[in-house]
Amino acid sequence: MMIVNSCCPQLTTYTPTSCNNVRKPPQILFVEKGYILQENQSATAPKDIPLVTSELFSCRAIAILGENSNWMAHIFEWPSTGQAHTKESMQKMLDTAAEMLGIQPVELPSCKVFIVCGSDPCDEIDEPLKSALSMYNINAEWFDGSDSTSPIYALAYQDEVGTANGDITEHHQTKEINSRQI
């Protein structure tokens, strides 16, 4: 696999209400295999197994890089419960992420956390997500995909988060993959 930038950038706090004027994600040029997360799904995997979202559009991906594994969620505009996202539902998602990474929620601020925005704005996700991140004192780096002319797929692999090409078709399923609905 080839990754454009060799290290994760410093984390920054995001304050605008949409993903406009936020740093562009690094483009991860090629992924041969990966575990693909569909809408409203989260998963953990060892760092050597890529976690990839299906196309984001107005969705968001959140990735948390743990010590030995990574966690990623593909957040759809409407949760699987059919009710709107709330700060509490996003807090529950972060609690689940901590559990799946084998850490306590109070340890989340020490992790590298990234949000990848799809091509369309979505305050229905951004506002409650920002509130939940703030409650946990998590500084996340937000990547903006709004200017993209091609489909946006978020990818977490090793200690990197970025966007991947649209040629990701293989699922690398192993017993080590732990996925849940959000």
Image: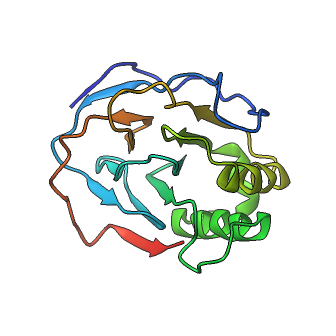
Residue 68 lies left or right of residue 106; in this view the side is: left
Viewer-nearest residue: 149 or 104:
149
| Color encoding of the figure | rainbow
In the rendered image, the quadrant that contains the N terminus is: top left
From the top left corner, tell me how far across and down residue 107 is, in percent.
Answer: 71, 55
Q: Quadrant of residue 166?
A: top left
**In the image, is 150 to the left or to the right of 118?**
left
Residue 46 shown left or right of residue 104 in the figure:
left
- The residue located at (69%, 66%) in the rendering is 85
Q: What residue is drawn where x is 26% and y is 72%? A: 175
Residue 102 in the image: state x and y as whole percent.
56, 66
Where residue 148 appears, x then y in whole percent? 42, 27
- Answer above or below: position of 158 versus 51: above
Q: In which quadrant is the C terminus drawn?
A: bottom right
Residue drawn at x 23%, y 67% is 174
Examine the rendering and report whether any part of residue 104 can be seen: no
Where does residue 180 sit, x and y in percent of width and height?
A: 45, 74
For residue 57, say whether it is visible: yes
Establish if 142 lies above or below 7: below
